[in-house]
Image: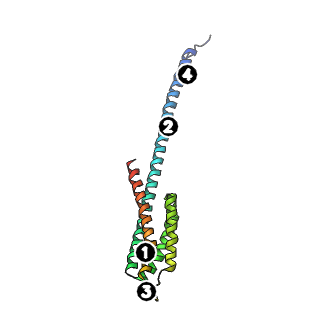
């Protein structure tokens, strides 16, 4: 006598089919959540990159604004013939220009970079030729005007770059 199986082959086949379908459904739901999570991660990474780029541009604009203000201040000191302050300011301005070129050079467009490089050369020549704390002879008005020229050019170039960076910041805010 044979014992009757508890579950017939037919029922076992249907049970296997049901378990398989449930497995496919669970796998599909898992895949859906994985794809959704991956999209969220990519969106978050893109948002992080945009925020980092925006912060970089903001910091560059602030540093350039500091340099522009220092340049304008030095121009005022030249006009009032405060040679001791001019000598100190010109050295710090030269260092600031070098820092800005090194730190923010990648944000500059090629033409802006060329203009800033030329302004740096002019400022370095100015530093080398600027009067010391107590010049032996007072510079003439023409000498003062020639000292103001590289400073004015540097201030103009930095204003131009600051303007572009500010516009880019506003445009990126709208995105």
- The reply to whether the C-beta atoms of the residues labelled 1 and 4 are less than 8 Å apart is no
* Label 2 residue SS: helix
Q: For mark 3, give the secondary structure.
A: loop
Q: Residues within 10 Å of mark 1 (few under 14, many from 20)?
A: some
Relative to the observer, which residue lies in front, 32 or 168? 168
User: Where does residue 51 sit, x and y in percent of width and height?
Assistant: 44, 53
- Which of marks 3 and 2 precedes in the sequence? 2
How far is disc 1 from disc 2 in space, using C-alphas?
61 Å
Quadrant into which the N terminus falls: top right
How far is the residue under mark 3 from the one under mark 1?
15 Å
Question: Which residue lies most toward the right here?
Answer: 1
Mark 2, other Cα within 10 Å: few <14 / some 14–19 / many ≥20: few
Horizontal and vertical percent position of residue 137:
45, 88
The residue at which mark 3 appears reads as 138
Ranked by sequence position, the earlier of labels 1 and 4 is 4
Q: Which tag is nearer the camera, tag 1 or tag 2?
A: 1
Question: Earlier along the polypeptide chain: callout 2 or callout 4?
Answer: 4
Q: Is residue 45 above or below residue 123?
A: above
**Residue 108 drawn at (x, y percent):** 49, 59
Q: Name the residue under label 1.
A: 148
Q: Which residue is drawn at 48% across and 40% down?
A: 39
Number of the front mark, 1 or 4:
1
Residue position marked by numbered label 4 in the rendering: 16
Foreground disc of the pair 2, 3: 3
Residue nearer the viewer, 34 or 73: 73
Instruction: Give the residue pinned by disc 2.
Output: 35
Name the N-terminal-most of marks 1 and 2: 2
- Which marked residue is nearer to the observer: mark 3 or mark 4? 3
Look at the numbered disc 4 and give the secondary structure of its residue: helix
Q: How many labels does the image show?
A: 4
């Amino acid at each position: 006598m044979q014992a009757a199986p508890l579950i017939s082959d037919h029922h076992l086949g249907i049970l296997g089919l049901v378990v398989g379908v449930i497995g496919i459904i669970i796998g599909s739901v898992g895949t859906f959540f994985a794809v959704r999570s991956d999209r969220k991660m990519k969106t978050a990474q893109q948002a992080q990159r945009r925020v980092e780029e925006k912060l970089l541009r903001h910091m560059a604009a602030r540093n350039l604004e500091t340099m522009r203000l220092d340049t304008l201040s030095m121009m005022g000191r030249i006009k009032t013939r405060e040679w001791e302050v001019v000598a100190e300011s010109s050295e710090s301005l030269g260092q600031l220009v070098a820092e800005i070129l090194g730190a923010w050079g990648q944000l500059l467009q090629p033409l802006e970079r060329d203009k800033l490089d030329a302004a740096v050369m002019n400022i370095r020549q100015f530093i080398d030729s600027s009067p010391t704390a107590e010049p032996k002879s007072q510079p003439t008005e023409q000498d003062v005007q020639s000292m103001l020229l590289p400073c004015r050019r540097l201030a103009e170039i930095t204003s131009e770059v600051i303007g572009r960076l500010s516009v880019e910041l506003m445009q990126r805010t709208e995105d």
